Image (cartoon, rainbow, N blue to C red):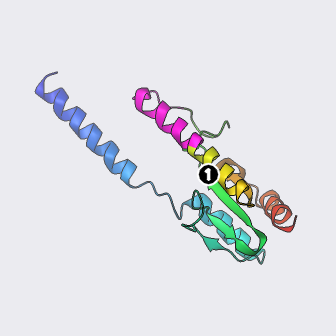
């Protein structure tokens, strides 16, 4: 690798790092869509309770129900909307995404063992607001 290639690689890694640093785990666009809709339906909730496994996005304590809003890429949803595993640096991405899925399973299992009911909403499911509203109402009223 010559000096020019090395500088490009460093710049690319730095650029990638900058992009990745901007990715949030809370208050994402999909989460805000679900929060606004749920609030407009008249339901009240708490956000990201740290005492619950996985810090669910929306917590309905009196109902013992939680909602997770998952990004399709980060939680490896098998949908057509989101691209699959990146073509570069697969040795990093495959284990990373597998760990995310395993952690999700563990958190959901812990919550169920604690008596909580769980709804997972995927980023790709949020486009049809009427359907989403019905899913939320059905889950919270059951």
Horizontal side of 66 relative to 101 (left or right) equals right
Residue 69 place in picture, x, y as percent: 64, 56
Residue 5 place in picture, x, y as percent: 19, 27
Residue drawn at x 86%, y 62% is 138
Number of residue marks: 1
- Which structural element holds mark 1? helix
- Per the picture, the main secondary structure of the magenta-coloured stretch is helix
Magenta range is 85-102
Q: Is residue 6 above or below residue 57?
A: above
Residue 98 within the segment the image draws in magenta: yes
Which residue has dot 1 on it? 107
Residue drawn at x 64%, y 40% is 77
Q: Quadrant of residue 112?
A: bottom right
- For the question of whether residue 73 can be seen, the reply is no
Q: Quadrant of residue 41?
A: bottom right
Residue 62 place in picture, x, y as percent: 75, 75
Residue drawn at x 40%, y 55% is 22
Q: Is residue 20 above or below residue 41?
A: above
Q: Is residue 94 above or below residue 124?
A: above
Horizontal side of 127 relative to 51 (left or right) equals right
Residue 47 place in picture, x, y as percent: 59, 70
Q: Residue furthest front?
A: 113
Horizontal side of 48 relative to 19 (left or right) equals right
Q: Is residue 127 above or below residue 102?
A: below
Q: Quadrant of the C terminus?
A: bottom right
Q: Quadrant of the N terminus?
A: top left
Residue drawn at x 42%, y 27% is 91
């Amino acid at each position: 690798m010559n000096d020019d290639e090395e500088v490009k690689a460093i710049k690319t890694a730095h650029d990638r790092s900058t992009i990745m640093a901007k990715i949030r785990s809370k208050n994402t666009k999909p989460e805000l869509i679900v929060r606004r809709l749920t609030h407009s339906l008249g339901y009240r909730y708490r956000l990201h309770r740290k005492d619950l496994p996985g810090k669910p996005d929306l917590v309905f304590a009196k109902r013992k129900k939680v909602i997770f809003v998952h990004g399709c890429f980060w939680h490896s949803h098998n949908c057509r909307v989101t691209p699959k595993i990146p073509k570069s640096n697969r040795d990093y991405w495959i284990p990373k995404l597998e760990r995310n899925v395993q952690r999700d399973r563990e958190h959901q299992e812990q919550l169920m063992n604690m008596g909580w009911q769980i709804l997972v909403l995927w980023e790709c499911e949020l486009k049809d607001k009427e359907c989403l509203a019905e899913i939320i109402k059905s889950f919270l009223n059951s």
